[in-house]
Image (spheres, rainbow, N blue to C red):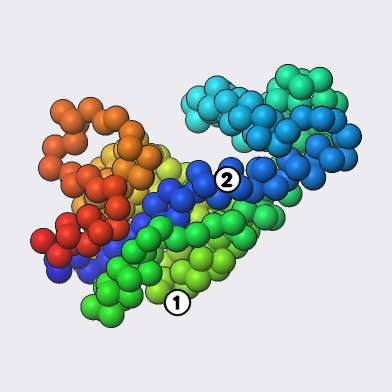
Amino acid sequence: MKWTHIYFDLDNTLYDHEMAFKKTILHCAEKMLLNKNKSVSVEQWFNVFKSNCDQYWNAYEEGRWSRERYQVKRFCKTNDYFNLTCSEEEALEFQREYQSKVASFAELYDGVSSILSTLRGSGIELGIITNGGQETQLAKIKALQLLQWIPHENIYISETVGIEKPDVDIFQYVLGSTGHYLYIGDTWDHDIKPAIEAGFDAIYFNSRNEAVDHSIRKNIPEIMTYEELKKVLIN
């Protein structure tokens, strides 16, 4: 294998973040709705909440809103929809509850443990480059038992590094002066494009089957399962 170092994104690359997100939000919402004594089903509440997450995401991603404002807005707009009370502190407490629980609902994608064992056994240095909070992301990594393949020193979390994807600098921060580096991620603009610009090879793990303009893909492999990833790495 030509690569000496292979780095992965975490959310929606090593585990199904969308599934863990839904299970955790349902758990937190059930507790919240019970406290409000309202006859709103947790599934109804989640569907509106997810819609608000998607609706307001661009405002956060483009830097017009802070992460905190985004979190408060999506929660309170959902409660407003159901005529439920809401405050900024309640919204932030809901977020803290989510962050403390999400690791317990995370599960590796099929085939991850097998391929990581094979790569580690071949002497390849494995690592993670992920956006997010240090405490939350480390809790997921530990819950997923990824430390048996990936050493602490090869884990780069944006809050700790002080640089967030899609900034090319976070990839350049990781890139060593020697070796051949590969990055595997699920988002074209936040993972693949900046990794390539920094000097990594890249594989696009399209875990959510998103449409991508093939004219900009060039020779970047695209896979949707770890079985497909195994074939690309071997070839």
Q: What element carries label 2?
A: helix
Q: Nearer the viewer, mark 2 or mark 1?
A: 2
Can residue 69 be seen at all in this image of the molecule? no
Mark 2 nearby-residue class (10 Å; few <14, some 14–19, many ≥20)? some
Q: Nearer the viewer, residue 173 or 69?
A: 69
Residue located at (18% from left, 47% from top): 221
Can residue 219 be seen at all in this image of the molecule? yes
Residue 226 lies left or right of residue 90; in this view the side is left
- Report the amino acid beneath label 1: Gln
Residue located at (51% from left, 66% from top): 144
Number of on-image labels: 2
Is 145 above or below relative to 139?
A: below
Give the CA distance from mark 2 to mark 1: 24 Å
Label number found at residue 148: 1
Is 226 above or below relative to 54?
A: below
Residue 93 lies left or right of residue 60; in this view the side is right
Where residue 101 appears, x then y in whole percent? 67, 55
Residue located at (50% from left, 25% from top): 58
Where residue 45 appears, x then y in whole percent? 69, 31
Mark 1 nearby-residue class (10 Å; few <14, some 14–19, many ≥20)? few
For label 2, the residue is: 21
Q: Is mark 1 on a helix, strand or loop?
A: helix
Residue 71 lies left or right of residue 196; in this view the side is right
